[in-house]
Structure formats: C-alpha cells, structure tokens
Image: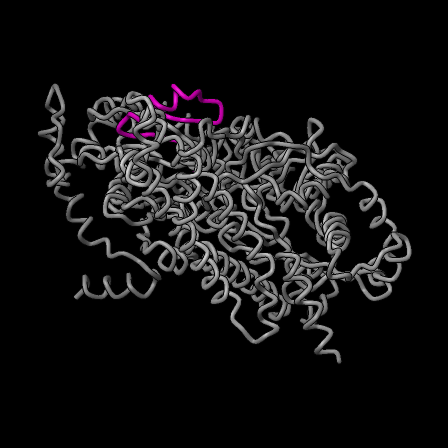
Amino acid sequence: MASISGFVRNLLDRPGGVNLSPYNKIVNAAHARADRIGKLEELPEPAMDDLAEFCAVAREAADRTLGLRPYDVQLLGTLALLHGHVAEMATGEGKTLSGAMAAAGYALQGKRVHVMSVNDYLAKRDAEWMEPFYTAMGVTVGWVGQNSTREERRAAYQCDVTYGPVSEIGFDVLRDRLCTAADERIVPTPEVALIDEADSVLVDEARVPLVMAGAADAGDAVPEMAALVRTLVRGYHYEIDEGARNVYLTPKGADSVENILGVELYDENEPGTLIEVNLALHAHALLAKDVDYIVRDGRVQLINPSRGRVALLQRWPDGLQAAVEAKEALPPSEKGEILDSITIQGLIRRYPKISGMTGTAVAVSEQLGEFYGLKVAVIPPNRPCVREDEPDRIYPTVPDKDAALVEEIQRVHATGRPILIGTLDVAESENLAKLLQRRNLEPVVLNAKNDAEEAAIIARAGERDAITVSTQMAGRGTDIRLGEEVAELGGLYVIGSGRHASSRLDDQLRGRAGRQGDPGGSVFFVSTQDDLITQYVPDERPPAADPDGLVRHRRGVYLVGHAQRVAEGVNLEIHRNTWRYTRLLEHQRELILEWRDKVLSTDSAARALEKADAERWAELPEDEREERARQIVLHAIDTCWTGHLAFLTDLREGIHLRALGRMSPIDEFHREAVAEYKTLQAEIERRSLASFEEPEPDLRRPSATWTYLVQDNPFGTEWDRILKRVTSAARRG
C-alpha cells in the first residue's frame, strides 16, 4: 500500500515526472555487488545490458580515481540520464559525476557522446577533472573550447566523450558545412547529447541562432541618428509599450524628426530612414549600458540575460548592433553575408538521444516535453535540505527596498555570517556595492565585467564575514563550501535584490545555500516599482505599505507571483513562435545537407554533369573531371543556400503585414518558404551546368569567415512594430 501511495504522490508532485522505482531497484542491486567489485584488482568492463553491474563498477572506479564515492542519489541521476531524461538535482548534489558516469555508460554502448556545457571554463574543468574516471572505465575523453585549434578539435571529437560549450559545438557543425573535401570535416555523426544546465540551454537559449558569416565589410554607422534621438523626450516624442519590448514615435515625434531631417518618414519607397531612426531609438530607449551590454576594450559586449555574463560571441542583428555602437560613439563592427545558421534548438534536435541535468527542471517540464519530448526525473537530495526560505520582503519603492536591503546586510554581517546577494544586472550590483562601501562594508563584486574571476570569487563566498554581490548564479559551476564556524552562524545567507522574470533563476540563487544538508537561509527583497511588475502587470494597483514601510497585504505577494507568471508566459510564447518559424528552415537545412554530403562523399556530381553535357565532360582531362564536378556543384549548393537564407530573412521581416489582410502570417510564411525551396534544386542544377560549361568557372568563396551568436531581436521585426502602430491607431479610431 505504501509503494502505491508513493507512486501516486510521485505523479502528483512532479509534473512531467519519471517514476524512480525501477532505478531504485537497480541501485539496490548494485549495493549487493559492491563487496565483490571492491576486492577486484582490475575493474571489469561492464556489459551495458546489466545496469546494476555498471553502477557497481562506475561507483568503484570513481572512488579509486577521484576519491569520490557516488551517493545512491547520484546513481539515480546517472540512470535517469541513461534513459534519456532530464535529471533535476539540487546544487551541490554531484551532477558533474552523475553526468560523467552516464556519458561513460553511453560510450560503453558504442555511442559517441557530446557533453554540452554553458562555457569554456566548465567544459575544460569537467573533462580534465573526470579524465581519470573515464580512463578507468576504458573510455577516452577530450574537450573543445573557443581557442582550440582545428587539429585539437579533430582529436577531441575522435574521443568517446567530448566536452564543449554548446555554442562551440554548434560552430564546428557550421564550419563543417563549408568543407569542400570529405576529410576536412571534424564533427562526427550526432549520437548522444548530454546537456549540463539543461533548462538554460534547452529553454532560455533555444532560439538563439548560431551564425557563420563571410565576405566581411564595415557595418553601417548612424551617429547622426544616435545624436538625434538623444534630443527626443519620452511621453512627448516617443512612447514605450507596457512590456518594454517596443518603442515608437508619437505623431509629434514623427513631425519633429521629419522637420530635423527634412524627409518624409513614412514614404513606402524610401523606408531606410524610418528604419535607421527606429533602430537608433530602440538602442537609446530600450538597451541600457551595464544592464543589456557593457563597453569593454572599445567594443559593445552583450550581457547574457539568463546568466549575467558577457556573451563573448553574441551580437544583435546588424542594424541594431550598429545603432548601439553609434550610441556609444564606437566604430561599427564588421558585418557580412550569412552563409549558414542554426538555432541551438535545431542543433540539439540533431541528436537521436538527448538527456540533461540541472537544478531547476520541473518549472520548465512543459517546454522540455513540448520541444524535445523529454521527461523530468526529480532526484531527491542526499541529505534533506534544511535551508530556511523566508517570505519576500516587499516595499513600495526602489529606494525603500535598497535602504532596507543595506540595513539587512549590515545587520547580518555584524554576526560574521557570510552573505551572497544576487542582483538582476551589472548596474544594480555596482550601485549596491557603493551603498555598502558608504557603510564601511567591502563586498566582492562578481558581474559581467569580471566574470573571468568567478570561480575564485564563488569559492570564497562561504567564508566567515564574506559579502559577495553577484549578477545571476545560473551555471556558475562552483560549489560554495562553508568556512570554519559558519555552520554555527546559520550557514550561507542568500539575498535576492529582486525577483527574476523566471522563477527558475530565483530557485537557482536560493540553491546556493543549504548545499548537502548544510544550514542556510534565503530571502528576496522586492519593490512594487521593480521592472518585473511595471513591465508585466502595469495596470495592477499595488497595496499600500504598513507604517514600518513593508507591504504585508497578501495582494502584494500575489502581485509579484502574478507578474512572474505573466513574464514566463510571454517568454514561452516567444519560444513557441520562434520555433514555428524556424522549424521549417531546420527541415530544409537537413535536406540540403543530405544532398551536400552526398556530393562531398560520392561521385554523384560527376555522374549528373556527365549526363547533362557529355561533350563537355569528354573535353576535360580525365584526372580532373570528378573533383572539378564536385567543386562546381558544392559551390552552387552553397551559393543558392545563402540566397535562400536571405530570402527567408526578408520574408520573415514583412510577413506580419499579411495579418492586415486577415491571413495567417505563419501559414503564409510556410507557403512561400516551401514554394521557394522547390525552386532551389532546379536553380542549383542550372548554376552547376552553367559553371561546368565555362572554361574557368568562378568558384571563389569568402576571403574570411567568422562565427557569432545573434541575440534574438528583443523588439520584433520592423514590420511587427509598424503593424502594432497600425492596429493601435485603428483601435483608437
């Protein structure tokens, strides 16, 4: 009866959850074999059809090589990963070792495994840390990073298990896409993707496009537009919508701009000026320095909103990137023709087997199921969590909140208890540090400006008297261990300076305290003027504060939670909408790559051109025919695919206007994209034959290529914005 009630509770409490009962039986069976395995001088290679034997051998191998004997819950996590699930394991519960055991298990099944992390540091650290374990299991391991050479990459991908940042593996896939000889390719056929920080990669960054570009030239600088929009006044010349995702000129603003520039902004035949003004206005009004980006080494560097770090390879679409550079009086960065691109979601879905691990998966179980067909296995902690999570402290204004926050930090610091404060952005972290310094407190600040020092900073955050201020704790990858006497003081005290747009980020911050049964505490300070509330529930009237300044009315708690749920809903819909548009492109990309791989690996190009023009074929030297045909067809495929991507980009920009004619934009996009793709094969064949018949065909390729990530335009397309203005005007009329 108890087992039945436990099973029911498992289903009710864990949305999208996996029943752990079968895995518990395997772990118990592994216990029974521990003594026998432990007495062996050499560990056997386990047969993967006996998972209990595998668990027993893996546990012993980890103990002997790393000095880490996996807990039962780590074996549960390993089994969940081996069955293609996302394992939710709390911070400090040993996800790295669970992932390594699962990767070894897949490798012993004869499958090549890519362990995807969120940055270079974690990929290198984990591969080198786990290497003795892999060696003991008879498995080879390597890693790739941003600075790896091509030969280092080739060697890493030949290993049974390869660690790497998800973006870097994606870039290698794109680089292979440009190879003109079969032996130049380095990334093997995708088999298993095991993803660390799975919710961040699979949900938060899923729609980020990875781009391969070529034929670089300077971007378009618009310094005069940047100067112009600085003179405009919010509420008079322009308005910002309730979600702070759109800014638009008022009629008075449009008149002022037209008078200054001496142009007609809404001339359908000359849309360029309107686009430049709007981009400059977006850069001015919606993108804030030290919040959305920093300026370092003379360049605009984006801040990843889900991690609080600099996204080294990330940029906005060319026009918006140039507008921000002009705003900061910087020279425009290079831009060029997109040769190929793939979203992170498209990259991950190439793998027949996907699994992952994170501390916060249940909250996104719906998305994991919808977009990847994944279920969540909630792994219990090795020791019960005794962290004390206090209710939010809600204040009416931001200054009230900041004052109370500083008072609380000073009060707790006086006891010696270490404090970790999580802020929402760089500007907030630096402002808080200044407020604390005025009280003669010296915090250590970790933000996007010094993220290279993060491991050392985080490692010291649990020491007595420590005050650490950090933007985002997701994916930091370093445990916070308590210093001497800190447990007696109550453990690490985590303070959030505001609620994030995602509850998962709040949970990740809280999870830094209470590791492995340690004592700890957490609390969030919130203002009803915080961006979360003013952006997502602007029409809600917050309750009044009590005489002591705190908002205690239950409606205050509801308001914060409601705003967070609205924000999560908005982001989910953005994800869904992006995938609706990119899913067809990913399918077309698979088809074109199948054709390209066939040309690269066989004589299909030679046979096709010989059949098309036998006379020309006979004229060519016999030892040159096949390779010449291959290069001609590859060039035609690549050139036509680049043109197809440009066509789809232009189509996406204007497709929303179809809604004015009561047509479905997504249906119209699919209809035209499919029709255009159907002409692609004929165009490739036409160009191939034309080049084949030329004495010296022009097969030049870009003189330079580079890779980068595109920060999905947070404001929608230009036509999105025009459509919104039109429909808003119609409603007012």
Where are the magenta residues, as a range? 143-166
The quarter of the picture where the N terminus appears is: bottom left
- Residue positioned 10% across, 38% down in the render: 32
Q: Is residue 555 left or right of residue 287?
A: left
| Any part of residue 410 in sight | no
Q: Where does residue 419 sit, x and y in percent of width and height? A: 58, 39
Q: Is residue 651 above or below residue 152?
A: below
Taking depth in this image into account, of 389 and 209 the one nearest to the observer is 209
**200 lies left or right of 420:** left
Above or below, 491 relative to 158: below
Estimate the x, y position of residue 423 in percent, counting from the top left. Answer: 63, 45
Identify which residue is drawn at 53% across, 26% down: 456
> Is 165 inside the magenta-drawn segment?
yes
The answer to whether residue 547 is magenta is no
Q: Residue furthest front?
A: 615
Q: Is residue 522 visible?
A: yes
* Rendering quarter of residue 570: bottom right
Which residue is drawn at the image coordinates 72% and 53% (left, top)?
A: 275
State the image coordinates of residue 453 (x, y, percent, origin top left): 57, 26
